[in-house]
């Protein structure tokens, strides 16, 4: 059984000048890394899904699906269409405001480290889902990353090999299922060329928007709530499975709205078939 995970991000890595409420400038408070997980047999249907979404917005000049370019009503429609498709979703959310002043600050200041760390969390959960979904049948996962400027994908592969070979200084609580993932099955593609990456962008951005405050300090949770049935889950609980805040939600110092949003994913997820 073959799976494909399309991976994209929302927000940025930096935390030197984090955006403050009421100001448009600065770096995002949250970084999100998300995946659209599909069976290889469903992969060829993703362009049709993307095209059906775009067909609802005939006046848009850009024929790529990019979440940030949509207005509110269009974002709602895009998420509604995605929620009906047989795919799995997983999103890792890092509250970067918790990093400065900690022992991890110098580590994550190094370029690519926070991104790679979230990718690791994502792959731990996605490979576990693939293994569970295939039961006793052998399965294989292909990774398709959306190309982002400044990311050293050779360094990412080296980081994955370090984990695979057990050379980490601290043993992780979870681990990537290396029977599912071959590091060589990792490719980097342009967002505009792959419908799967455009769907992954919508999924990741929908959850990022739910935790990232706008200039007024507000959060828009509706998009993520529509996608709730698609999240990887265990017995209906998606928190720390398909949706994982880093650090854990109680250590992320969430606002009341963020806390309510995160805890809403402890039940009622996965009501429709997965990937």
Image (cartoon, rainbow, N blue to C red):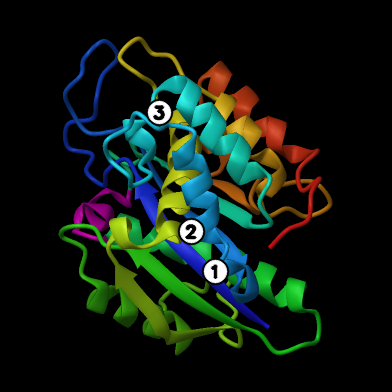
Residue at x-position 42% and y-position 78%: 168
Which span of residues is magenta-colored? 103-112
> In percent of the image, x 61 and y 27: which residue is there?
261
Identify the residue under disc 1: 44
Residue 102 within the segment the image draws in magenta: no
Task: Report crowding for label 3: few under 14, some 14 to 19, many 20 or more residues within 10 A (C-alpha).
Answer: many
Give percent across and percent down for residue 251: 52, 37
Residue 199 sits above or below residue 68 on the image: below
Element under disc 3? loop
Q: Is residue 266 left or right of residue 83?
A: right
Q: Is residue 25 left or right of residue 11?
A: left
Q: Earlier in the sequence, mark 2 or mark 3?
A: 2
Front disc: 1 or 3 = 1
Q: Could you tell me if the residues under marks 1 and 3 are in contact, i.e. CB atoms within 8 Å?
A: no
Q: Are marks 1 and 2 in contact (CB under 8 Å)?
A: yes
Q: Quadrant of residue 192?
A: bottom left
- In the picture of the structure, the residue carrying the numbered disc 3 is 212
Q: As rendered, which of 159 and 267 lies closer to the eye?
A: 267
C-alpha gap between disc 2 and disc 3: 29 Å
- How far apart in space, not on screen, are marks 1 and 3 (Cα)? 33 Å
Q: Secondary structure at mark 1?
A: loop
Q: Secondary structure at mark 2?
A: helix
Along the line of sight, the residue nearer the viewer: 194 or 112: 194
Q: Residue 266: horizontal and vertical position, in percent?
A: 74, 39
Residue wearing tag 2: 47
């Amino acid at each position: 059984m073959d799976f494909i995970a399309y991976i994209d991000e929302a927000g940025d890595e930096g935390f030197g000048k984090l955006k403050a409420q009421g100001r448009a400038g600065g770096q995002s408070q949250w970084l999100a890394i998300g995946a659209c997980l599909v069976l290889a047999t469903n992969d060829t249907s993703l362009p049709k899904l993307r095209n059906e979404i775009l067909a609802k917005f005939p006046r848009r000049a850009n024929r790529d699906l990019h979440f940030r370019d949509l207005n509110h009503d269009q974002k709602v429609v895009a998420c509604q269409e995605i929620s009906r498709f047989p795919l799995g979703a997983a999103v890792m959310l890092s509250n970067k405001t918790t990093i400065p002043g900690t022992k991890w600050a110098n580590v994550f200041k190094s370029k690519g480290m926070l991104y790679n760390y979230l990718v690791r969390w994502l792959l731990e959960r996605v490979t576990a889902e693939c293994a569970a979904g295939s039961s006793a049948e052998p399965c294989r996962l292909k990774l398709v990353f959306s190309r982002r400027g400044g990311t050293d994908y050779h360094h990412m592969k080296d980081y994955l090999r370090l984990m695979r070979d057990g050379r980490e200084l601290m043993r992780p609580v979870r681990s990537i299922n290396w029977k599912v993932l071959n590091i060589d099955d990792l490719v980097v593609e342009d967002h505009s060329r792959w419908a799967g990456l455009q769907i992954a962008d919508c999924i990741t951005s929908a959850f990022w928007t739910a935790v990232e405050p706008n200039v007024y300090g507000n959060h828009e949770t509706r998009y993520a709530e529509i996608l709730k049935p698609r999240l990887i889950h265990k017995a209906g609980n998606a928190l720390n499975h398909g949706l994982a805040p880093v650090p854990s939600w109680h250590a992320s110092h969430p606002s009341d709205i963020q806390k309510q949003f995160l805890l809403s994913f402890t039940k009622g997820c996965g009501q429709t078939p997965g990937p």
